[in-house]
Image (spheres, rainbow, N blue to C red):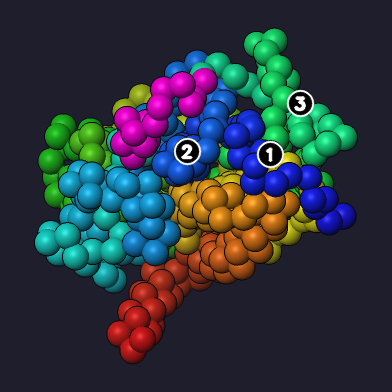
Amino acid sequence: MPISNIATKSSWKNGRIAIIGGGPGGLSLALILQKYGIPAVVYEREAFDPNKERGGSLDIHDDSGQLALKEAGLLEEFQAIARYEGEDFRLLDQHGNVFMDEVADDSHDGDRPEIDRGALCDLLLQALDPDRIRYGYKLLQAVPLQDGKHELHFENGHSETVDLVVGADGAFSRVRPLLTDAAPEYAGLTMVELNVEAAAHPELAAFNARGKLFALGEHKAILAQLNGDGRIKVYASFRADRDWLDTCGIPFEQPEEAKRRLLEHFAGWDPMLLNYIRCAGDTLMPRRIYMLPVGLQWSGKPGVTLIGDAAHLMSPFAGEGVNLAMLDAMELALAIVNHEALDAAIAAYEAKMYAYSSQSAQMSDSNLQMIFGEEAAANLTAFFHEHNQTLQTH
């Protein structure tokens, strides 16, 4: 069904744009629209900014996330606080054999510096008019109206009628069903998130270095990353049936017993790698990894679109999640700025987004299969070598 021609520049750009979800993508969209004088309001389900509690360190790419920050006028501020040393990367197998040990250049020449999710969102929020974000607004339903607008109903009893609703509300988006029946599918991977206080475990901190460490083998991985707050965020990851978390019997609310059982799951791994589990704090967060179909598209509809995980949820193994959300935000905002009709803006944005997000989703899925496949450390080393050679010849 094609988008109907429902709006002109004069009739809708002073109307109402609702962004559902206050993560980096939603905040970036609101901020870039604010720059161009176009009103938009972010509706965040939590009663406070939740970003400090979600996720860890993010690498912000120069060809996506940093472009959005530049468009928002925040690139220099970002570069001043980003951790270029966070591009350190170590790759090992389960026996502790080192396959790669890359040390980043501290001179701000790297193209993927790190920043904690909370710090990134603080940067965006400090530049955003406080009137443009509302907390405690959990969307229950978005009802299409005859004129292409939508009536939004929130759990707190509030209702709004808007010209454009943008789903920036993540994996299990409440907005996505307006456009497609596609739903997230389990990717075959389960993770347990842990945190190690680096200062309390200096030997492990030195082993981890300043950035990321991947230890791969037996269709499992210990993935560790030093965050800006002094924690090493660890993801004990492995292939498992979807119901494994329900049937494994591990009492994740009992940290010592849970860690003991998790150590059994990684039995035979190098003792230093197992220290990532032994030294972890008392909070263990198990989660399943989900993905949308690679290359997902939908038929455009009036007054609604998606950005970020709501549009193209993928596993984290292309490093693109937050970067694509911010790139989506920039492309959608500029499409709104540069098109007189809302239908044309949405169509232009979605065509661009489908092209780049499908490539990243395919890469993410391929990388997941490699990282949790046979000879994972050797194969990932060969992949990086080939990729670096390609970069040097272009």
- Where disc 2 sits, the SS reads loop
In whole angstroms, how far apart are the C-alphas of marks 3 and 2? 23 Å
Q: Indicate which disc residue 24 carries.
A: none
Spatial CA distance of label 3 from label 1 is: 18 Å
Q: Are marks 3 and 1 in contact (CB under 8 Å)?
A: no
Q: Residue 64, position in %: x, y?
A: 42, 59
Q: Which residue is mark 2?
A: 37
Q: Which residue is mark 1?
A: 11
Asked if marks 1 and 2 touch (Cβ < 8 Å), the reply is: no
Going 44% across and 69% down the picture, which residue do you hit?
A: 376
Q: Secondary structure at mark 3?
A: strand
Residue drawn 52% across and 53% down? 334
User: Which residue is labeled 3 in the image?
Assistant: 151
Residue count near mark 2 (Cα–Cα under 10 Å), binned few <14, some 14–19, many ≥20:
few
Q: Quadrant of the N terminus?
A: bottom right
Which region shows up in magenta? 120-134
Q: Quadrant of residue 149?
A: top right
- Identify the residue at horizontal 60%, vertical 19% (top origin): 137
